[in-house]
């Protein structure tokens, strides 16, 4: 297997030949020398390479860890691809014309050769530590948060001091001398995951969206080739973040940097696995190279103040702050998951305006928006504004419920831990799959359905689980992860491994996720399809009389290992315990539901037939008199049988009319039709009716022929007319209807009797309703924030209202959240305080607190800007979402 890989001497020979054959494209230099006197070779590649240092650049580094051979192999194949294709590939040619590639195939030549020739899994360089040990982990030897270790034999020993090693000194000096570098990619193995740089503070950075989008767009290119999806995972609390790495050092210099972990083994089967990894990463590298110019001084500035102006159930209006110029426009991207690509597949708008309305959205759904400015002439694009996250409002007949498992109801069961499995619940994380240490492991999650109404009609459901580590999933394209719904009432003990493992499945949930689609750092989602929602509905109905109304899920992965393999295991966050990341990363079940409709039949309060010269009460008829003048029918319905308008939603309405047809001598074959109008009416007389204010037509008109065929007619209300009914209901106005006859030509002596009042066939209005609060509660008040015990403590006063269910707290670095979903979830519940322990209390940020009812309708936010010793209340955000603040500085964050 090793013979197929390239030695370092062969790498140098290849680079020298490439430069000699393409001197206008490639420049070769040694940037330093190792302990064993090997040159550290760098190739500079650009169209007209003599001007390479004047262009924005991408830095590629590979094999900083000796055993991670992918970096060196990919570099060689990428350079060969460039040589063979740059003249014919317009995307590649454009990237090389506008940008420069600095590529160091192997930053650890001594270690690579030691790994190739002696110990395959050697990681460090070959420094003689003077105590009988050798080597420094070069990726712990950079200056960013360098930590000197005491154990020089450790694989992660960082050396006696920062930049103690000739290899890290060489790349440091080169980077400092080439400030045209805007992007840096450091290639490692293993895990199939991007690890974007961080600043050691567990907070979102202004460049965080740029890094996520860069990785997501590279991911898109990877998926085109092999179908594989890489994870995207920045460090998150409470994990200890890596210190002394090159990635963070480059980032500290203003360079967007990410590690790319390729493959599932350090030295995989070349033909079966390594060749795939190389082929899928070349298009991704071409994309990244083309992006370097967009993060240079040539690029337009970043869009600021990107936020929500107005939020609806099927539309959203966004706004931003930017000087409007003729030579600039904006690209807006929309996705239904974060860390998603921003390319032609997700581009929803190109505009020169400073606002945008997105329409035809789905109610109660999560959306993620990104924006960048584009120079119309050069096509150079700005960095991204921080991603805007939101959830559309619910439709007027919808409720939503997000369920989190209790601490004792989420964990895993391992075949090799039968007596200790209960300890795995609410602690650490969830391991699912199989390895030699733990055996076969199943995840178990139980959701209490007690808060789901008995009459709920489930319209949408999905389950979400956060994969936090896939390094133990070592086998490429082997196995899958799936979810079973179990009968919660048939299991006495969810901590019993054998009971869970052998429990029959009620049904499977959603799709299975293949191993090459299981992405670390990106939420895994299982959506219920129609059949599965029906099954969930059935489970809920079965549990109506049970003491335990619970949904029990079993998550399972591979259960066997091929010969020679020791692990195919995924690790998921449970949001509890020392490795849990709190509410924001907790597994959860999202439900959108309606309720069973309650029909209300209303009989007319009054009926009138309105002739040109008189009004006949208690009779309902319409048509034409002998002179061809219209005879109107008028109905009125009182509101005393309808519930409180603030808590009643009209889901369906229709008018039922029964008739007996009377035809005069002059009718002939003329086309006569009858329409129903919902109207505003002051007086019941002919003149007032002729001057009536029409609100909307109800249903479709009916013809004489239709009346002959069917004596009973239904006139259905559309969405607009139902809204009109709700408006009239809220204003305590009666519902007035007019029946009007129309004819294609002159008609007379035609009268249709629609049955009088008190007749058993008289007209009736049927309104189907559900009880649902329409309007949000008042926002929390007295919001205070302070620094306490290295954390941020918030307190507030909840509204005193019988419909109050809880308050929701969210954090955002860059602007006051106008939506409860625009940022990091900190707390949800009835308390009037919380402590944010998962961020950095020394970093400025915004907090918003929303009250909510049982729909939930979310209040306007109570918002505050926190900056260590400075606290500013953002009172203007308590206005309606459509309100525009005049203090723009409050929206610019702390860049």
Image (cartoon, rainbow, N blue to C red):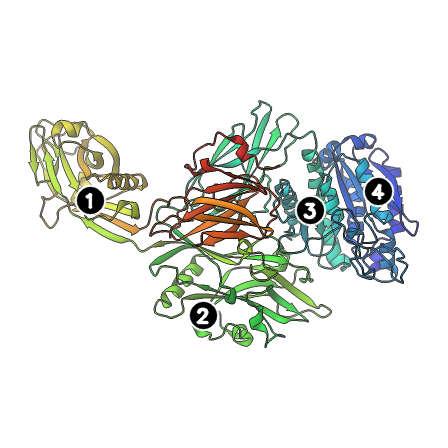
Dot 2 corresponds to which residue?
488
Element marked by disc 2: helix
Q: CA distance from mark 1 to mark 4?
A: 82 Å
**On screen, residue 389 above or below 789:** above
Dot 1 corresponds to which residue?
639
Dot 3 corresponds to which residue?
197
Q: Earlier in the sequence, mark 4 or mark 3?
A: 4
The reply to whether the C-beta atoms of the residues labelled 3 and 1 are less than 8 Å apart is no
Element marked by disc 1: loop
The image quadrant where one finds the C terminus is: top right
Element marked by disc 4: strand
Q: Earlier in the sequence, mark 3 or mark 1?
A: 3
Q: CA distance from mark 2 to mark 3?
A: 43 Å
Q: CA distance from mark 2 to mark 1?
A: 46 Å
Q: Provide residue 5's location: percent of width, then percent of height.
A: 83, 55
In this view, the residue farthest toward the top is: 326
**On screen, residue 764 above or below 526:** above
Q: Provide residue 94's location: percent of width, then percent of height.
A: 71, 33
| Front of the two marks 1 and 4 | 1
Q: Provide residue 859's location: percent of width, then percent of height.
A: 41, 44
Residue in the image at 47% along x and 43% along y: 819
Q: CA distance from mark 4 to mark 3?
A: 23 Å
């Amino acid at each position: 297997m090793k013979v197929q890989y390239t030695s370092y001497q062969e790498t140098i020979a290849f680079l020298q030949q490439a430069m000699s054959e393409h001197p206008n494209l490639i420049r070769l230099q040694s940037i330093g020398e190792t302990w064993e006197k090997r040159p550290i070779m760098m190739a500079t590649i650009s169209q007209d390479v003599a001007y390479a240092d004047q262009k924005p650049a991408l830095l590629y580094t590979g094999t900083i860890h000796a055993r991670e051979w992918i970096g060196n192999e990919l570099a060689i194949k990428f350079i060969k691809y460039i040589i063979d294709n740059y003249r014919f590939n317009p995307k590649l040619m454009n990237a090389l014309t506008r940008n420069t590639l600095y590529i160091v195939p192997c930053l650890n030549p001594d270690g690579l050769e030691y790994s190739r020739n002696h110990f395959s899994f050697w990681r460090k360089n070959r420094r003689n530590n003077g105590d009988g040990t050798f080597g420094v982990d070069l990726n712990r030897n950079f200056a960013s948060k360098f930590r000197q270790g005491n154990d020089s034999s450790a694989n992660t020993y960082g050396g006696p001091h920062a930049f103690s090693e000739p290899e890290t000194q060489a790349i440091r000096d080169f980077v400092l001398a080439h400030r045209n570098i805007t992007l840096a990619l450091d290639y490692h193995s293993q895990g199939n995951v991007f690890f974007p740089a961080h600043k050691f503070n567990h907070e979102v950075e202004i460049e965080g969206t740029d890094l996520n989008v860069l990785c997501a767009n590279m991911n898109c290119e990877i998926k085109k080739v092999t179908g594989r999806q890489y994870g995207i995972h920045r460090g998150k609390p409470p994990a200890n973040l890596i210190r002394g790495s090159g990635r963070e050092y480059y980032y500290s210099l203003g360079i967007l940097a990410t590690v790319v972990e390729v493959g599932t083994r350090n030295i995989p089967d070349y033909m079966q696995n390594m060749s795939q990894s190389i082929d899928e990463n070349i298009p991704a590298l071409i994309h990244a190279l083309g992006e370097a110019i967009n993060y240079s001084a040539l690029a337009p500035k970043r869009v600021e103040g990107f936020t929500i102006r107005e939020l609806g159930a099927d539309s959203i209006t966004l706004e931003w702050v930017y000087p409007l110029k003729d030579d600039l426009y904006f690209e807006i991207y929309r996705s239904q998951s974060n860390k998603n690509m921003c390319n032609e597949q997700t581009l929803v708008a190109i505009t020169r305006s400073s606002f945008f309305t997105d329409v035809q959205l789905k109610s109660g759904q999560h959306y993620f928006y990104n924006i960048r400015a584009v120079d119309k002439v050069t096509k150079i694009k700005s960095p991204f504004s921080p991603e805007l996250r939101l959830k559309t409002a619910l439709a007027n007949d919808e409720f939503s419920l997000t369920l989190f498992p209790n601490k004792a109801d989420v964990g895993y069961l391992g075949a090799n831990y039968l007596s200790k499995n209960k300890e795995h619940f609410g602690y650490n994380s969830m391991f699912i799959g199989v390895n030699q240490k733990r055996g076969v492991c199943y995840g178990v999650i139980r959701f209490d359905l007690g808060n789901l109404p008995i009459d709920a009609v489930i319209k949408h459901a999905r389950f979400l689980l956060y994969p936090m580590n896939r390094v133990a999933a070592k086998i490429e394209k082997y196995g899958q992860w799936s979810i079973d719904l179990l009968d919660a009432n048939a299991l006495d003990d969810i901590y019993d491994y054998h009971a869970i493992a052998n429990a029959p499945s009620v049904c499977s949930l959603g799709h299975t996720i293949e191993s090459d689609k299981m992405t670390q750092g990106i939420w895994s989602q299982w959506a219920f399809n129609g059949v599965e929602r029906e099954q969930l509905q059935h489970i809920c109905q079965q549990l109506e009389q049970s003491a335990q109304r619970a949904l029990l899920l079993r998550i399972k992965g591979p259960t066997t290992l091929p010969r020679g393999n020791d692990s195919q295991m995924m690790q998921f966050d449970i949001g509890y315990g020392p490795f849990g990341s709190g509410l924001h990363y907790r597994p959860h079940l999202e439900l959108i539901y309606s309720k069973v409709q309650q029909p209300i039949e209303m009989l007319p309060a009054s009926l009138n037939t309105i002739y040109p010269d008189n009004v006949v009460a208690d009779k309902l008829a319409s048509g034409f008199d002998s002179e061809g003048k219209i005879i109107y029918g008028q109905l009125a319905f009182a509101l005393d049988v309808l519930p409180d308008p603030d808590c009643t939603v009209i889901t369906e309405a229709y008018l039922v009319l029964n008739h007996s047809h009377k035809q005069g001598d002059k009718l002939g074959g003329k086309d006569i039709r009858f329409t129903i109008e919902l109207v505003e009416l002051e007086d019941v007389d002919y003149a007032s009716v002729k001057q009536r204010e029409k609100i909307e037509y109800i249903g479709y008109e009916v013809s004489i022929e239709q009346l002959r065929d069917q004596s009973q007619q239904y006139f259905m209300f559309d969405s607009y007319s139902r809204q009109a009914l709700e408006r009239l209901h809220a204003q305590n106005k009666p519902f007035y209807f007019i029946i009007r006859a129309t004819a294609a030509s002159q008609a007379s002596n035609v009268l249709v009797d629609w049955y009088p009042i008190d007749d058993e066939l008289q007209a009736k209005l049927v309104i189907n309703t559900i009880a649902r609060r329409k309007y949000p509660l008042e926002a929390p008040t007295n919001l205070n924030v302070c620094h306490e015990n290295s954390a941020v403590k918030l307190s507030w006063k909840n509204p005193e209202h019988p419909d109050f269910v809880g308050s929701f707290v969210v954090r955002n670095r860059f602007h006051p959240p106008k939506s409860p979903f625009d940022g990091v979830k900190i707390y949800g519940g009835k308390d009037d305080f919380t402590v944010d322990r998962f961020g950095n209390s020394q970093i400025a940020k915004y907090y918003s607190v929303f009250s909510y009812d049982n729909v939930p309708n979310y209040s306007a936010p109570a918002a505050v800007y926190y900056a260590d010793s400075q606290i500013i209340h953002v009172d203007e955000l308590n206005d309606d979402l459509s309100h525009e603040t005049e203090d723009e500085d409050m929206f610019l964050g702390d860049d």
